[in-house]
Image (tube, rainbow, N blue to C red):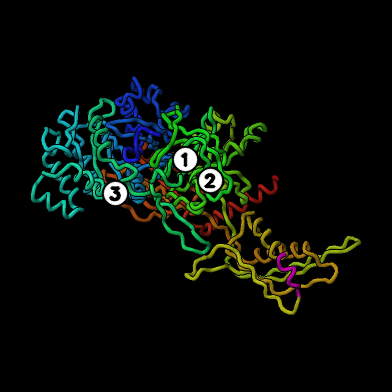
Amino acid sequence: MPAYSTAEIRNIAITGHTASGKTTLVEAILHRAGKIGRMGSVEEKNTVCDFEPEEKDHQHSLNAAFVNIDHEGKNFDLVDTPGMPDFIGQAIGVMPAVETVAVVIGADKGIQTVTRRIMKIAGERKLPRMIIVNKIDDHVNELEGLLYHIQEAFGTECLPINLPTPDGTDVVDVWERSDGETAFSSADKAHTAILDQVVELDEELMAVYLEQGNALEKQQLHDAFEQCLREAHIIPVLFVSAKTGAGLDDLLHLMAELCPSPLEGNPRPFTIYENEGDEPHEWHASEDASADVFGHVFKITTDPFVGKLAMVRIHQGTLKPGDSLYIGEGKKPARVAHIHKLQGKEHYEVDSAIPGDIIALAKIDDLKANDVLHSSHDLDHVAFTPLPLPRPMFGLAVTAKSRNDETKMGESLRKLQEEDPTFIVERIAATKQTVARGLGELHLRVLFERLKSHFKVELETAPPKVAYKETIRGNAEGHHRHKKQTGGAGQFGEVFLKVEPMINDDGTPAEGYEFVDETVGGSIPKGFMPAIDKGIRQAMGEGALAGYPVTGVRVRVYDGKHHAVDSKEIAFVTAGKRAFKDAMLKAKPALLEPIADIEVTAPNSAMGDITADLSGKRGQVGQTDMLPGDMCLIHAKVPLAEMNAYSAQLKSITAGQGSFVMDYSHDEPCPPNVQEQVVKEAELEEVEA
């Protein structure tokens, strides 16, 4: 059994914007805890957490990395996460495994886009948050202003529980004491402010506090502080310098004392489906070490020596090597041979895992992210409540560089998708391309580098064709008689049909397809209707205008003819297909293009250039919000066809200070000039083929 209990576990995700010093902070913590003899550095490429070749090359964290330390009788699992916007999925993906999200803000850069997104998502997941202001040694004079911007951006519940000394070489704890010289404000004022905030949620404690002042027992304050964290009534702010070690001991002490254990944090929500047709409802694990084992696979990674590793958070029960666990609703149990704890790229075996533990399981090939593991069929219908992961919208068409690569490409890409939930690969029937999608250009570039270094597969890439859709704007009739005589039994089928656009109740074009049989008198036997429907669906898949799939069409088959001997299914498939194409070409066919919702965060000084650029891309600029720190948030809807190179363009406009997120919004008709160009290109490709 572990030498610690569930109450002594502290699971903390170290998150924040790029270059805020997260990896250096974790390195300093490992050194202070005696886990490493000498601190490494990102520049020297020898840190514990940035161990992948791609991370060393780019000098940035690209994957979530796990380390474990003991401090003040507590067992810490710390997760170092990437800070670049393209890799925010890695930070979001570990949130189900932790009780606390620590958001690191570099004092030199202040609040960034990723800072805001992580704070928002962690708040929505009801995870206690803390803010760590790093690099205080070189920016002492800017810290008071930064604290003001933090409170402006995230609320007055962001209160310091320590303050830097005037020279930035140390900090003053204002949680447990009220004296000491500080760079700004005062220890007494900050101490009073945080106590006032903590006792607000407990009327009895507030009454004692008002009567006796600071004469409150340590346990009373601890319990009240935990409640404030759980209810987001307080977001503690701590100051530190990972480089010099200023405030590091205070940070570790306060995390040990105040960060919630798995018994104290908000329970992670799961969904339970009891009976078919019942409404699903929220379910929480018991965190009882003697209960049936229940765990959640929150991340998949690949180790070059061990192979596939599943990162699992144990929520209840005690797991030991040799135990068997069921995967979701699977009926065949999987045997757990070994249980590992991770220390960067190293892993060591443990003899058991208790509620709250973060562990790695190897050689269970069926596991995938978001699976639940359990030891009892009573937990068959418990499922993970999905995370709000950003949708991957940046795409590249991919092909194998050689025939040898082609044989390995599919399986290798599948493994990358297992490791990264914000990376998807899909075959687009409309464009006949395999498209890999990620959160940005850098995201895909790094994944393709990993594909080459880990799986020895090289890809060739190109901008993907836009997945247009075809539809109609008018009503029309179509007809085709299919008659074929080859000496024996012939083929005969004749179809008359009408097409019309599908319209929503609010008058907007609808998506989808509807087939209506309006024949009377047995002109076409009912048994041939599925064949006609099949032919129409084939025609819709091929398109009639530029070869793109058709949507938003209602088809009414109202007449036809058949032959008692020669009518066969294939005849009506062909007749239905050609009758539909005949009707569609008469029904004012139109191309639909995908429109993306984008949010651009940039300095106020670049707002005019950005809005002008978006308008030049046929975009519709919407609301613009002013953000703290002289930043703005621009909302717009832009055709996806115009967004392929936007990442580089935005960096150029904003001198690297801008970022954007993008998601699919809807489809809408192309302008006539764009439609004409797309149709011409499709005709040219058909001729060349």
Tell me the element at label 2: strand
Q: Does the residue at mark 1 contact the one at mark 2 (Cβ under 8 Å)?
A: no
Please provide the residue range marked out in magenta. Answer: 523-530
Task: State the SS at label 3.
Answer: helix
Side of 293 where 453 appears, left or right = right
The residue mark sitting in front, 1 or 2, is 2
Which corner quadrant holds the C terminus? top right
Q: Mark 3: few, some, or many residues within 10 Å (few <14, many ≥20)?
A: many
Q: Left or right: 582 with respect to 564?
A: left
Q: Which residue is mark 1?
A: 299
Residue 9 pos. (x, y %):
34, 38
Q: Which residue is mark 2?
A: 326
Residue bearing mark 3: 230
Residue 415 included in the magenta stretch of the image:
no
The earlier-in-sequence mark between 1 and 3 is: 3
Q: CA distance from mark 1 to mark 3?
A: 25 Å
Specify whether residue 611 is in view: yes
User: On screen, 561 above or below 46?
Assistant: below
Most foreground residue, 304 or 410: 304
Q: Amino acid at mark 2?
A: Tyr
**Are the two marked residues, 1 and 3, in contact with CB atoms closer than 8 angstroms?**
no
The single residue placed furthest to the front in the displayed view is 290
Badge 2 density bin: few <14, some 14–19, many ≥20, Cα 10 Å: many
